[in-house]
Image (cartoon, rainbow, N blue to C red):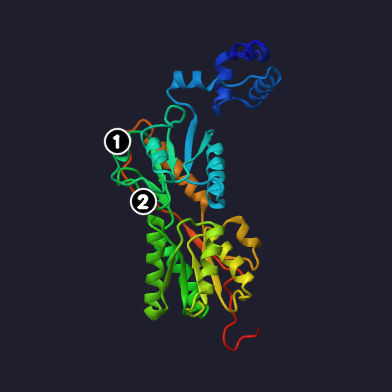
Amino acid sequence: MARVRMRDVAEHAGVSVRTVSNVVSGYPHVSPATRERVQRSLDELGYRMDYLARGLRSGRTGFVALAVPFLAEPYFAELAQAVISAAARRGITVLVESTAGDPEVERRILSGGLTNVADGVLLSALTVPADDDAARAADFPLVMLGEHSVGDRFPRVGIDNVAAARTAVGHLVEQGCRRIVALGRNGSENGRQRTEGYRQALSAAQIRRVNWLVVPVEDWTREHGRAAVRELLDGSGPLPDGIFAFNDALAVGALAALDESGVRVPDDVAVVGIDDIQESAYTHPPLTSIAPDLDVIAERALSLLAEQEGAAGVAPREEATPYRLVVRASSLRARPGSPT
């Protein structure tokens, strides 16, 4: 079957090829009646945009690439959806790639591995060093998402992780917790920042250092969170009365381990996470969490990407986006003298 061309659509709709092009490209200055007539012809004839040809003509593909570590992890899946929705409002299509946190994959992306199909890249990196040669050589529109940076050449968008961790731990302190475990430290920049916020909150509350405990967890998943908390409960040390999990997946695993061990949440141990994934509202009990504004992250990242098109570059800067503490039953403890 012969491919339908713009000329075929123009003849069918009784308009010029230019008008069809304007409708397909989303050009705003087309009358509603004409747009409707052209769209009807597009649908009836089954026209499909030739993106490769459009890219060759305009120098732009109309695509951006989003590279995240793990699409199976709820936070990154929800972030991808926010980016896709924000891009759709701009008439942009998002190509999503999972890096599995592999430095070689991240290095390939920094070397321009996605620029043959995309006008720019949003990258949530985990492992590639900031001084890596690929990071220094990257010369295409690029915005970093999250905590991990690849030097100071590119703009980065995300929440202030130190402040967010401080807020989460401060909430546990307000609930009367004094032996608070930080669950999730690893070698990542994300882990470093959330550990720092934990320490700052305990210092501000004058919690004795003997009650500080940071539990390393290499992979921030439900399975690893559950295993780490089970090991903690099986140990000889005193039971913590609060757990600050470095993400909600770890917190969900922690809740499972506590429930299996007969530990009451929040009466015995209060739990707070970070990310406020959709699952958090449906755990038992529902999980208190730090909620980043994913819609704002997506919008700001796309705006910073657009600023780089046709420019010599964008002044590198970090944009701290809003977050809020969503308080649920996992951390709300009865205060002394309050009804139970």
Identify the amino acid type marked 1: Ala
Quick one: 4 or 10, which is closer to the camera?
A: 4
Identify the amino acid type marked 2: Glu
Residue ID for mark 2 = 318
Q: Residues within 10 Å of mark 1 (few under 14, many from 20)?
A: few
Residue 240 position (above or below residue 77): below
Residue at the far right: name it.
Answer: 44
Say if residue 290 shows up in the picture: no
Select label 2 or label 1 by which is in front.
Answer: 1
State left or right for residue 47 relative to residue 238: right
Q: Position of residue 41 (x, y in %)?
A: 68, 19
Q: Residue at x 49, y 29 (%)?
A: 62
Residue ID for mark 1 = 137
State left or right for residue 235 relative to residue 187: right
Q: Residues within 10 Å of mark 2 (few under 14, many from 20)?
A: some
Quick one: 47 or 288, which is closer to the camera?
A: 288
Q: Position of residue 32 (x, y in %)?
A: 64, 27
Residue 79 position (above or below residue 313): below
